[in-house]
Amino acid sequence: MERVPVLKIGDMLLVSIQVDMEDQTALALQEDLADRISTTGCHGVIIDITAMDIVDSFVGRTLSSIAGIARVLDAETVVVGMRPAVAITLVELGLSLDGIRTALNVERGIELLARSRREAAAFVPDLDDPAGVWALPEGLGPDDRSTPTTP
């Protein structure tokens, strides 16, 4: 059985599927990715399917499972390089690939993940605030919060 290589690039993992995705290969990829996300702490997974001419229902479901596992491990999944025939097949099979974002190519996938991480970082709670209040914009202190006034 062939294994699909998983490469670490910064805070992301890149999977370029260049082999026929038989059921055993897809299951091995699912396990390998879960292990790599866990050991590296990466927050993004890019799966490049440019070389795939066809996708069957099992592989489609496995891609969905990979995204679900990645999400539980705090990583977002982006599938890149989907050919129109593959997209049509997935829709005809009734597979919506929930939780998986798509991009045209690897470069756009990396940009999408980077933008997503920046947006998520903008909404990090202030853990030093005992009230659990979200961090205020720079320049504002606790006394600058909007409070109702009485006449």
Image (cartoon, rainbow, N blue to C red):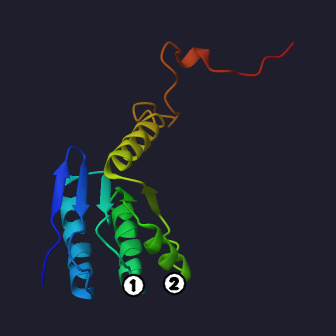
Q: Give the CA separation, mark 2 to mark 1.
A: 8 Å
Q: Mark 1 is on which residue type?
A: Asp
Which residue of the protein is positioned furthest toward the right in this rendering? 151
Left or right for 1, reference 31: left
Residue 140 rendering spot, x and y as whole percentages: 53, 15
Query: For mark 1, does the 10 Å Cα neighbourhood hold few (<14), some (14 to 19), or many (20 or more) residues?
Result: some
Q: Residue at x 47, y 68 (%)?
A: 84
Residue occupying image coordinates x 76% and y 22%: 148
Please say whether residue 57 is visible from this viewpoint: yes
Q: Quadrant of the C terminus?
A: top right
In terms of depth relative to the viewer, which is nearer, 23 or 51?
Answer: 51
The residue indicated by pointer 2 is 93
Mark 1 sits on what residue?
56
Q: Secondary structure at mark 2?
A: loop
| Image-based side of 8 in relation to 91, left or right | left
**Residue at x-position 68% and y-position 21%:** 146
Determine if residue 124 is in view.
no
The answer to whether mark 2 and mark 1 are in CB contact below 8 A is yes
Report whether 94 appears left or right of 77: right
Classify mark 1: helix, strand or loop: loop
The N terminus appears in which quarter of the rendering? bottom left
Query: Is 108 situated above or below 22?
Result: above
Residue type of the residue flagged with mark 2: Leu
The disc, 2 or 1, on the residue closer to the chain's N-terminal end is 1
Residue 108 lies, in percent from the top left, at 38, 46
Q: Position of residue 123 (x, y in %)?
A: 48, 37
Question: Which residue is pictured at 33% across the width and 45% down the height?
Answer: 107
